[in-house]
Image (cartoon, rainbow, N blue to C red):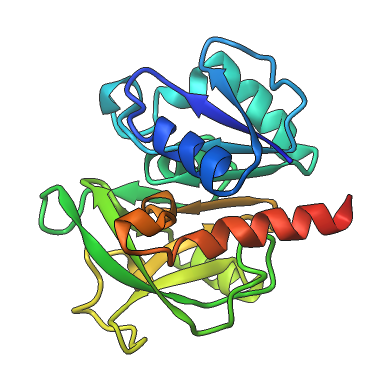
Amino acid sequence: MKFGVVIFPGSNCDQDMVYVLKNIMKQDVVELWHKSTDLQNVDAIAIPGGFSYGDYLRSGALAKFSPIMKSVIDFANRGGLVFGICNGFQILCESGLLPGTLLHNDNQKFICKNIYIKVENNETVFTSLISKNRVLKIPIAHGEGKYYADKETIKEMRLNNQILFRYCNSDGEVTTEANPNGSIENIAGICNKNKNVFGMMPHPERASDENLKNIDGKIIFESMINTILSKI
């Protein structure tokens, strides 16, 4: 497979993503600069974490206007696989590829720590190898990670099985105490109706290398690669 990793001014997790896809997952990877419109015939696109355009206005608000995002949106609307992590999730929401938005954490502070997420739907490209209700330990690092959508949108997302991950404790219990940022219904990751665009606030690329003593995030990348290769 060939992955494209989009890089904006302020991206700071792009090389983490490139490293995991290229060195851990053994896939072809190209870097897609924000001023370009050429997607270089990639099979999937990753939008990494960071502070695109310095998070001016609000996180992801300026990135959606970059030349590369016009191509990414067109790619996604044609069924292409796109996934965003942290700031990438914010950008996908701002671009209208995913429903809802990301707000400031309830405590108004930047949070960087390991948390737990529970798999709600394992029938997507991104979760196909993960058993439902499995608990994964994944790090977070964000100041605006509180997922929010109105009641009608949340209802529709439930009906369409678009909620993929919820924050939980180590026993898999979805509780208020286990919610690090105040996200509505403990939502940590979602997909679009067509199940080809995915976003999550936790960083699976920071939990994919055995040298870091945690590879819980690796199975998300394995799911994507396995599902796509099976269709080629």
Considering every residue shown, the one lying at the far top of the view is 35
| Image position of 82 (left or right of 48) | right
Q: In this view, does 126 lie above or below 128?
A: above
Q: Is residue 200 above or below residue 74?
A: below
Count the marks. Answer: 0
Q: In which quarter of the image is residue 12?
A: top left
Q: Which of 22 and 177 is in front in this view?
A: 22
Q: Where is residue 3 in the image (x, y as percent from the top left)?
A: 65, 35
Q: In this view, does 74 lie above or below 170?
A: above
**In the rendered image, is residue 138 in sight?**
yes
Q: Residue at x 39, y 59 (%)?
A: 210
Considering every residue shown, the one lying at the far front of the view is 211
Q: Position of residue 15 (x, y in %)?
A: 42, 31
| Image position of 210 (left or right of 95) | left
Q: Which of 174 and 154 is in front in this view?
A: 174
Q: In which quarter of the image is residue 76?
A: top right
Q: Where is residue 140 in the image (x, y as percent from the top left)?
A: 28, 55
Q: Which of 209 and 70 is in front in this view?
A: 209
| Image position of 56 (left or right of 87) | left
Q: Which quarter shows the N terminus? A: top right
